[in-house]
Amino acid sequence: MNDIVCGEPSGLFTERYEWKQLSYGTPVFSNLFNVFDATGDQYATIQSSPRSTIIHPSTVIVKLANRELYKPGYIDRLGRFLQQYGLQYIGISRIDVCCDQNVFCTGRNPQTLIQDFMKDKILKNGLCEYAVHGKSNNIQNYSSISFGSKTSAVRAYLYDKTKELREVKDKPYIRQVWKENGIDENKPVWRVEVSIKSDRTTLVKYDTGEIFKLNIEDIVHQKCVEQLFIDYARKYFSFKHNDGQKNKSRMKDVVLFNPAWIATTRPIQITPANNSTRMDKTVLKRIDHMFNEIRCLDEADKLAIDHVLTLFMTNKSLTRYYHNKILGNREKRTS
């Protein structure tokens, strides 16, 4: 899980956590804090005091540190943390869920999956952009594939996590979790990851038809996280064997995960009733311009602007306008 939008803190320093304010903020928030727990591990990054009047002045973004997410009971700790500092939970702005494995449940090699997709031996369900990375020797040696663009409400990834830990930054606590769960770290470990933004956290239950908004209470237990992963993976990371039929829905499914993992909900999009104005479109263009034209932004800054961009276009029902007009016009200019 990545980011949770909350209310403004009533206090900053306690015996249990140490807050260290950085000398800089982000393009969206004036204040930026690193929070450390009693063991010295980084617990979270806090952004507060938004610069823009578009965002409510009491808005705070809490991003849990990666290591915290591998510790048992992190949701309970988060609840106590919010209560301790007078933070009121509002909603999830982004959540990432993943599944690590050496091979898929049928023994299929993840790299072979990418190769088969690139050769049209298998077809992905749904339409979306994709990008692949790898090296070309005598054969195409793929290390990752992603589905969706940076503005997509949901993006799905398949990548060699072992390679990332080796070449980018090693995280021993991830390797420990692999060991505890029978994953062989001496072989390539591949991660399927689904990144979900706030405007795609509404789900409908298959059995009752009930529509609900994803809440932190829905990911309290490991089983809940696993269920959330499979619910989104079934829609955003599923494939068909290409047997030449015109109707893709009649093609045989590519089995990747345990068949006992049954999806119980389906992500849906509900368009807000708010009507956008000409000024709203102008503001959206300015946010997009900031995201794409300022070259010196680091990843944290880009992520913050991306959050604002997504929340604003969703609230103002401008998602289609953004894709068709703003992105469409940009593609025409660069083509």
Image (cartoon, helix red, strand yellow):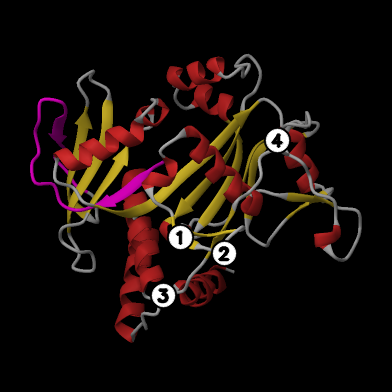
Residue 295 visible in rendering: no
Q: Between tags 1 and 4, which lies in front?
A: 1
Question: Which of 240 and 289 lies nearest the eye of the viewer?
Answer: 240
Question: Which of 244 and 291 lies nearest the eye of the viewer?
Answer: 244
Classify 10 Å Cα crowding around label 2: few (below 14), some (14-19), many (20 and above). few
Circle 1 sits in a helix, a strand or a loop, which is it? strand
Question: x%, y% of residue 293?
Answer: 37, 61
Magenta stretch: give its range. 1-25
- Alpha-carbon span between mark 2 and mark 4: 25 Å
Name the residue type under label 4.
Answer: Asn
Q: Quadrant of residue 141?
A: top right
- Residue at 23% x, 20% y is 40
- Residue at 38% x, 43% y is 2
Q: Which residue is mark 2?
A: 209
From the viewer's perspective, is 244 left or right of 90?
Answer: right
Circle 2 sits in a helix, a strand or a loop, which is it? loop
Q: Earlier in the sequence, mark 2 or mark 4?
A: 2
Name the residue type under label 2.
Answer: Gly
Circle 3 sits in a helix, a strand or a loop, which is it? loop
Residue 10 belongs to magenta span = yes
Q: Earlier in the sequence, mark 1 or mark 4?
A: 1
Q: Quadrant of residue 197?
A: bottom left
Classify 10 Å Cα crowding around label 1: few (below 14), some (14-19), many (20 and above). some
In the depicted structure, whether residue 228 falls above or below residue 269: above
Q: Which residue is mark 4?
A: 258
Q: Which residue is mark 1?
A: 212
- Residue at 40% x, 69% y is 314
Q: Which residue is mark 3?
A: 272
In the depicted structure, whether residue 36 falls above or below residue 96: above
Q: Are marks 2 and 4 in contact (CB under 8 Å)?
A: no
